[in-house]
Image: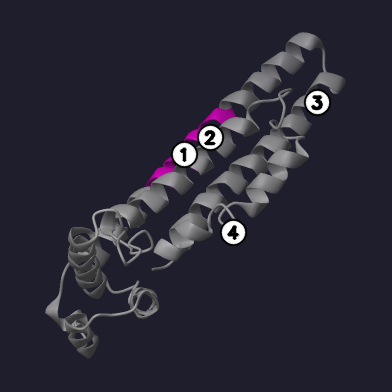
Amino acid sequence: MSRQHITNMKNAVQGYFTKAVQAAAQAQKNTDMYRADVAEAENAKLRDALQAARWEAEAAIREAQDAGRADAERWGKLSGAEMTDDTKLLQMDLSSDQFADLVDRYKDNGTMTTLLAQYAERKNKEAAAADPLGIGRYDVSSIPTVEKRAEVYDKFAMSARNLITRVDQNNTFGGGVNSPMLKASIEQFGEPNAFTAGLFELI
């Protein structure tokens, strides 16, 4: 599945941050150039424009989130045409490594992934019945599902909204247009790292 929806969220945040930086610079110029009442009037216009820009950015994030969730739903629709000859392997006792290879091979195929999840659930129940103190043979945490894929976009959308909120938090730790920490966070948004690698594996 394309990661374009996450890129669109990042673009929305970056766009708002750029406008906030420009507005802050112009506000300072107004303060330096004009009488206090004139500067305040001009800066009020800047604040109104920036609020509109924030609403626009938040709308773009919601749109990207909704599009990602819709993609997850489409991915999860079962289709016999997506079944491959590898379904025959599910009649065998697969090693955990063999099973993991199949999950990785078919993570973009919702039908095959569903079959793999059902196989793992059945085999893990059999293993638990034979050894109640043991654990399931197959790791199902990395198996994509509609819910998991949709949740990826929910989490990135939440992070994007948090970044936008931090843009407006001037004079607070880690916030405001002059924060190097915030600028770095925006630049790194949507990039695989130790915290997001597991999410990207699901999509």
Q: Residue under label 4, please give it.
A: 191
Q: Residue under label 2, please give it.
A: 54
Q: Amino acid at mark 1?
A: Glu
Residue 181 lies within the magenta run: no
Q: Is residue 80 left or right of residue 142?
A: left
Magenta region: 49-64
**Rendered view: 36 above or below 85:** above
Q: Amino acid at mark 2?
A: Arg
Q: Nearer the viewer, mark 4 or mark 1?
A: 4
Q: Nearer the viewer, mark 4 or mark 2?
A: 4
- Secondary structure at badge 4 equals loop
Seen at 55% across and 55% down, the residue is: 190
- Which labelled disc corresponds to residue 58? 1
| Residue 122 or residue 74, whichever sits in front | 122
**Mark 3 nearby-residue class (10 Å; few <14, some 14–19, many ≥20):** few
- Which labelled disc corresponds to residue 28? 3
Name of the residue lying farthest toward the right: 32
Badge 1 vs badge 2, beta-carbon distance below 8 Å: yes
Q: Report x, y in % for residue 28.
A: 80, 26
- Secondary structure at badge 2 equals helix
**Mark 1 nearby-residue class (10 Å; few <14, some 14–19, many ≥20):** many
